[in-house]
Image (cartoon, grey):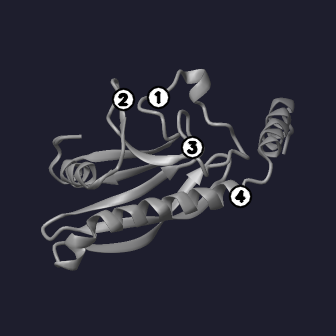
Amino acid sequence: MPRISDFDKFLADQRADKAKYGDLSERKAQWIGKIDALYGQVRTLLEPYQANGSMEFTRSLSEIHEEELGSYQAPSLTINLGASSVRFMPIGTMLLGSPGRVDLVGLRGSVRFILVLPDMDRPMHMAAAEPKRGRLDLAPYIWKISTSPPGIRYSVIDAASLQSAIMEAANGHSRHR
């Protein structure tokens, strides 16, 4: 097979890009921990509805592929509501503007859950918003619900905002958030 010098350079650049991120296993472990924490918060806020049989929770694994992390499995959470269901699906941790996103997806809509610093209520400027690749400590980040672009706003997750997000994902139209 003939060798093309541009291709050789391309492959060398790819190896160099992977090496500059270093070992991302700790980042992946923190990310999975943050997903588990979100699901724990969801289950706690919705526990009265599970206790009275109005909903059921089912955990599963989703295959995620991120350029820097490769392919891995991350937990998903399905909430069975009777006639319909909604599912929390991890999107990734190496994202522009946030070190993590999970989407709540239903038959007629979806709602974004974003990892942000506690005092953030909207995205920062693009240069400041890009998460540091690799060794970023996710410990200070918390989950908030994000509105859709263009006027993105973040809100805390409480019982009312979570219930609204579930209705939005299932019914396709926004409620009070």
Question: Which residue is at the front of the view, 98 or 16?
Answer: 98
Question: Which residue is at the front of the view, 5 or 100?
Answer: 100
Residue 28: x %, y % from top left = 64, 57
The residue identified by callout 1 is 123
Sequence-wise, the earlier of marks 1 and 4 is: 4
Q: What whole-number distance in Å separates the C-alpha atoms at marks 1 and 3? A: 12 Å
Q: Which residue is situated farthest in the left direction here?
A: 83
Sequence-wise, the earlier of marks 1 and 3 is: 3
Residue 151: x %, y % from top left = 33, 24
Split into 4 quadrants, where in the image is the N terminus? top right
Split into 4 quadrants, where in the image is the C terminus? top left
Residue 136: x %, y % from top left = 68, 44
Sequence-wise, the earlier of marks 4 and 2 is: 4
The residue identified by callout 4 is 26
Left or right of residue 169: residue 35: right
Looking at the image, do the residues carrying marks 1 and 4 touch, with CB atoms under 8 Å apart?
Answer: no
Residue occupying image coordinates x 35% and y 28%: 149
Q: What whole-number distance in Å separates the C-alpha atoms at marks 1 and 2? A: 7 Å
The residue identified by callout 3 is 99
Q: What whole-number distance in Å separates the C-alpha atoms at marks 3 and 4? A: 14 Å
The residue identified by callout 2 is 152
Residue 60: x %, y % from top left = 43, 72
Residue occupying image coordinates x 62% and y 36%: 131
Looking at the image, do the residues carrying marks 1 and 2 touch, with CB atoms under 8 Å apart?
Answer: yes
Amino acid beneath label 1: Pro
Q: What whole-number distance in Å separates the C-alpha atoms at marks 4 and 2? A: 30 Å
Amino acid beneath label 3: Pro
Q: Relative to 30, is 95 above or below?
A: above
